[in-house]
Amino acid sequence: RDGGEVLLLRRVPDGGGYWHVVAGALEAGESAREAAARELEEETGLVAALGDALQIVEHVDPRTLLPAHPSTSGVAVPITCFRAAAPADWEPLLEAEHDAHRWCPPPEAADALVWPETAQALRTLCAR
């Protein structure tokens, strides 16, 4: 949002209990941009224009659904990241996947993320 802060959402304990950015999966027939806009609105209530796309790949441990090192049996998951702007006074309306939110400077936000490639994407998008 204005002032350079990044929104982080905390997943509920059953969803891992970790801090993350808005995220989700494609639905049938959706583009990555359409899915990102839908997830942003569903998870926070924000309707906003999305910036340029940044492609990354995260590696997921299929047993835990948490990050895996690329050299292990982790599954490669392609992800398209976008940046969106929120008004300075706007606050999210959380849905059932999240139990808390916080605004923080980009370096702090990136350090809080458990997904390494997503953290790097956040650093890159915030530097633009």
Image (tube, rainbow, N blue to C red):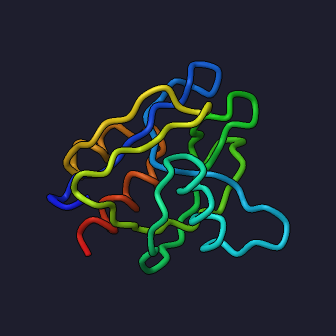
* Foreground of the two, 44 or 63: 44
Using the image, determine if residue 97 lies above or below residue 60: above
Above or below, 50 against 126 in this view is below
Locate residue 31, reporting x and y percent: 70, 75
| Residue at horizontal 85 percent and vertical 66 percent from the top | 28
Residue at the far right: name it: 28
Q: Is residue 103 above or below residue 77?
A: above
Seen in the picture, residue 116 relative to 114 is either above or below; the reply is below
The answer to whether residue 104 is left or right of residue 13 is left
Q: In the displayed image of the protein, which residue is found farthest to the top? A: 13
Which of the image's four quarters has the N terminus? bottom left
| The C terminus - image quarter | bottom left
Which residue is found at the position 36% from the left and 58% from the top? 122
Of residues 31 and 66, the one drawn nearer to the viewer in this rendering = 31
Residue 78 percent location from the top left of the image = 65, 63
- In the image, farthest residue toward the left: 3
Q: Which residue is drawn at the image coordinates 66% and 65% (left, top)?
A: 35
Q: Nearer the viewer, residue 83 or 79?
A: 83
**Residue 46 point in image, percent of width and height:** 46, 57
